[in-house]
Image (cartoon, rainbow, N blue to C red):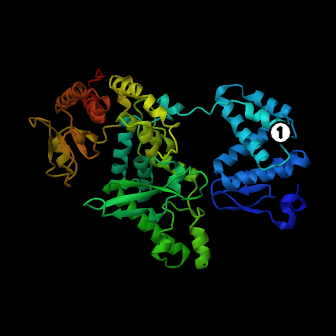
Amino acid sequence: MDNNMKVNALSVNNVSKSVSFNGYEFDICSDVWKLNINVEINVSFIDEFSLEIQDDLRATLAYFAENKSVGHTANVCREIKGYLKNGFKTITQEGVISYKSKFLAKKDEYRLGVLRVFLKQIYFLEFNAVSDQVFELLSSWKLSGNDKGTAVLSLDAEDGPYSDTEFEAIRFGLDNKFAESVINAEEYSLAQMFAATGRRPIQIASLKTGDLRIDSKTLDAPVFMLRVPKAKVRGRGFRAEFTDFAVIESIGQVLRIHVESVKKMAQRQIGRALSKEYSDLLPVFPGDLKQLKGLSDDDLRMAMDTDVTHRKTVEITSQLKNIIDKLQITSERTGKALKTTGYRFRYTLGTRAAREGAGVLTIATLLDHVDTQNTKVYVANIPEHAATISEIMNGSLMRYASAFQGDVVESEDDVFTTIPGAQRIRTNDSRDNIGSCGTNAMCHDYAPVACYTCPKFKAWRDAPHHLVLKWLLDERERIIQDTNDLGIAAINDRAIYAVTQVMKSCAELKGDVAYG
């Protein structure tokens, strides 16, 4: 139906404009409602219901769009359409019972719960679409919530938390690829925000440049602090509440460089200088800033208070995947390229916290959950996760762990041809040489362990790498015996993988095909 032809209670006196939970204006009588930068819903299906209840459905759905999260509103919209597909044009006992029969499995009952919330809200708003009898029927149902934490509980190798080896490979990879200019400051900052904070993609997308600050009061030394918006705050809109995170200096310095570049780029695209007040409202990961050009101060401030110039979450997630793909990490669990989602970093943060002894309340606070129902899964799988760490050490997929990043060379002479006077790297007891450092820059990392995972390391073909491997394995076993903590014992597992890979490469250079 043409929107201009609609005449109903909602459009009397032309009062049909409303504002979504995230501050976006939409026309209730329109077929398409844009609720935030990421989501718009099509409500034209409401016209397929009986005429006498269309206004009630549209007005109640508008209530959800105004007062509930965009995701919840979209889910409600989906379930109303699901009810309609059952062939019922009005809300009746027969209709809701028929709809309920579609979701007999416990795992699907949460969807029925979404429709029930909507229908009961119609009743609470005193509309006529839901009768007393239907309301009583809905209230009598005992429904299960949706399954929570399946990927975490199962330690899913593609969707669940990263293993320690995978997570360390990401951290090392980001540092190395940024140093090599394979990824830029924006890419490094975006990936590190996920890794360091475990926030949801929508929270990373909502960051503004003013959220980064240096705190010199709390501690004696300056500390980079990041103010991260909370995502699921009931009854509150865009960037209503925040959680502060301390960021290590190396990440904070790069993030500051990126923030300054965003401010300079914004002034070029907008065509005007911005005061600190306005520049602090710029998105850390901007979308289209040119749309701000020519706006008055008041309109500019209004636009910058919203998410209109922020990058969409789907774009943030896609960029994150591309960044991790550039690191070329192979999972030791699957033997394939590491699969990345924004939520895997979140699951990893919760799982690692649980393994270190954090309880459900602490993890709920760490992950910005309003209650503990979603955090119990993290403490439930501690034994299984510990066992997984240990089993990987003997697994056939260990050869896939992308740990060794350097090169195997014939001898020290090969290194001297490009790096004269390159420093030698010795074994732990300093009795034997195992390779050369491929840079003359100052390094404070723990040699030789850190060298095996450094892309600058030049491992000598005939060096006794097996001595380093033996020391690492003995140290791992000693830590297990002393602490009974597989998480602590796994701290050098990536180095163990790297030494193993060096030994394999050396054997191949020698023609020892029987190795491994």
> Foreground: 160 or 411?
160
Q: Position of residue 491 (x, y in %)?
A: 28, 35
Q: Identify the residue shown where x is 73% and y is 56%.
A: 33
Secondary structure of residue under mark 1: helix
How many numbered discs, if any? 1
> Does 87 sit left or right of 267 as displayed?
right
| Quadrant in which residue 185 is drawn | bottom left
Q: Type of residue at label 1?
A: Asp
Q: Identify the residue shown where x is 24% and y is 44%.
A: 457
Q: Identify the residue shown where x is 53% and y is 31%.
A: 150
Q: Identify the residue shown where x is 60% and y is 63%.
A: 308
Q: Position of residue 222 (x, y in %)?
A: 29, 62
Q: Quadrant of the N terminus?
A: bottom right
Q: Position of residue 52 (x, y in %)?
A: 90, 48
Which residue ends up furthest to the left in the rendered image?
431
Q: Position of residue 476 (x, y in %)?
A: 24, 29
Q: Is residue 360 above or below residue 256?
A: above
> Does 445 sit left or right of 161 as displayed?
left
Q: Quadrant of the C terminus?
A: top left
Q: Would you call the spot at circle 1 few (<14 residues within 10 Å), some (14-19), or many (20 or more)?
A: few
Residue 241 seen in render = yes
According to the picture, the residue beneath numbered tag 1 turns out to be 132
> Does 35 sit left or right of 316 as displayed?
right
Residue 42 seen in render = no
